[in-house]
Amino acid sequence: MPEPGSRKYDRKRAKLRKEAEDSGVPDQHANEAADKTLRKDPSMRSRGPRTARGLGPKGERPESLG
């Protein structure tokens, strides 16, 4: 799953930005349109921490998570 900052995410964003520019949208608005589109797409969102360590100090984690 691509996450913001990953190569796959950046390539998709560049493609969306180019499509917007080609359809006559100004540069700044093309950036905003591409970002908005990617934020709406659930497959492009961050999934959160990948390990238990990413959840924070062990004493502060919810019981069910580790």
Image (cartoon, rainbow, N blue to C red):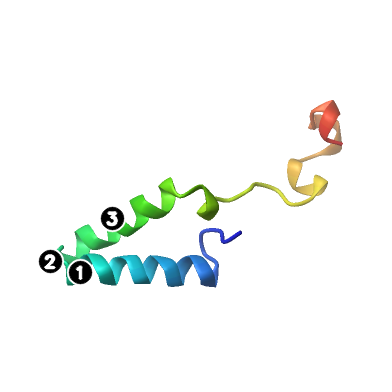
Residue 20: x and y, percent?
A: 23, 65
Residue 46 x/y as whole percent: 58, 51
Where does the image place residue 43, in percent across and percent down from the top left? Answer: 54, 53
Residue under label 2, please give it.
24
Cβ atoms at labels 2 and 1 below 8 Å apart: yes
The amino acid type of the residue labelled 2 equals Gly
* Position in image of residue 36 (x %, y %): 34, 50
- Identify the disc placed on residue 40: none
Kindly identify the amino acid type of the residue bearing the numbered disc 3.
Answer: Glu
* 41 is higher (above) or lower (below) than 16: above
Residue ID at (53%, 72%): 7
Q: How many angstroms separate mark 3 from mark 2 (CA)?
A: 14 Å
Of residues 64 and 43, which is closer to you in this image?
43
Query: For the residues marked 1 and 3, what is the alpha-carbon distance in whole angstroms?
Result: 11 Å
Q: CA distance from mark 2 to mark 1?
A: 5 Å
Q: Please tell me whether mark 1 sits on a helix, a strand or a loop.
A: helix
Q: Earlier in the sequence, mark 1 or mark 3?
A: 1
Are the residues flagged by discs 3 and 2 in contact, CB closer than 8 Å?
no
The crowding category of the residue bearing disc 1, from other C-alpha atoms within 10 Å (few below 14, some 14 to 19, many at least 20), is some
Circle 3 or circle 2, nearest the eye: 2
Q: Residue at x 35, y 71 (%)?
A: 15
Report whether 56 appears left or right of 33: right
